[in-house]
Amino acid sequence: MNLSSSDAREIFWLARYLTRIQYLCQQFPFKQNAAALSYAHAFCLPAFDAASLNELILNEEQPASFAMQFQQSSVKIHNLADVLSAQAYTELIRFIRNACDNAAYICDVVQDCHDVLEAEPQNIFLFFQLGQKLEELDRQIRLKQSKDMTVAQVEIIVQLLKDLGWLSLAEAWQQLKQQPDSMNFYHFSDHIQHLLSVD
């Protein structure tokens, strides 16, 4: 199955939202003020200690909350009704309903969604991996975490995309690989967004 740019974009952003939620689930609740401040500053969140960050994450009206991030994921899944296999789509919708009925299930559902998407055809999972690894790299740069493993994984994905005709991505990737900082990341990310917008 050939993916349109718009379908690939939906898969890419679904992966980014799910990966973002998954990492947040691993950190929540924040207990140390220093760690909470580091996270809040890195993502420009209006929190000043662990308690205020935890409160923000649980506030359904906040863009960075579990609820809002999951809502974005839900929208992406619904938009992929004609792209995913019938079985995968049915399972994902069931997971979404469970999480909507009980927000405590969101962290469990995120992993379940990942497992379902991993079993989809290679071209679908390729763009899912691209979103997943870019989200991880973005976070690692922001929080000054180790990036070596993620860079190696993105290298493989870029090569697979090159085989699909994304030849222009190589130069932006080389710049990011040589100097993985925010400026090069945004340049690379913008290049991907452009390619995902071309039908």
Image (spheres, rainbow, N blue to C red):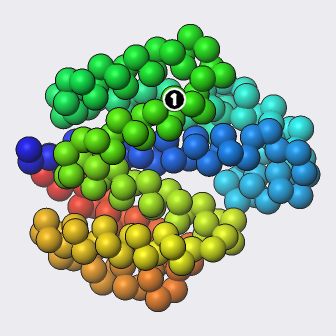
Q: Position of residue 156 (x, y in %)?
A: 32, 72
Q: Can residue 167 be seen in this view?
A: yes
Along the horizontal axis of the image, is 82 left or right of 90?
Answer: left
* Residue in the picture at 40% in, 17% down: 94
Q: In terms of image quadrants, where is residue 174?
A: bottom left
Is the N terminus in the top left, top right, bottom left or bottom right quadrant? top left
Label 1: state its secondary structure: helix
Inspect the image, locate mark 1, and give the three-letter code of the amino acid beneath it.
Answer: Val
Q: How many marks?
A: 1
Along the horizontal axis of the image, is 141 left or right of 46?
Answer: left
Q: Where is residue 41 in the image (x, y as percent from the top left)?
A: 76, 57
Mark 1 is surrounded, within 10 Å at the Cα level, by few (under 14), some (14 to 19) or many (20 or more) other residues, namely: many
Q: Residue furthest left?
A: 1
Q: Against 21, is 144 above or below?
A: below
Q: Mark 1 points at which residue?
A: 109
Instruction: Please tell me which residue lies in front, 47 or 98.
Output: 98
Q: Where is residue 166 in the image (x, y as percent from the top left)?
A: 18, 69
Q: Is residue 70 visible?
A: no
Q: In terms of image quadrants, where is residue 52?
A: top right
Instruction: Please tell me which residue lies in front, 197 or 117.
Output: 117
Along the horizontal axis of the image, is 199 left or right of 103?
Answer: left
Along the horizontal axis of the image, is 87 left or right of 129?
Answer: left
* Residue in the picture at 49% in, 42% down: 17
* Residue in the picture at 57% in, 30% down: 108
Q: Against 163, is 130 above or below?
A: above
Q: Which residue lies furthest to the top in this view?
A: 101
* Residue in the picture at 28% in, 61% down: 194
Q: Position of residue 139 (x, y in %)?
A: 60, 61
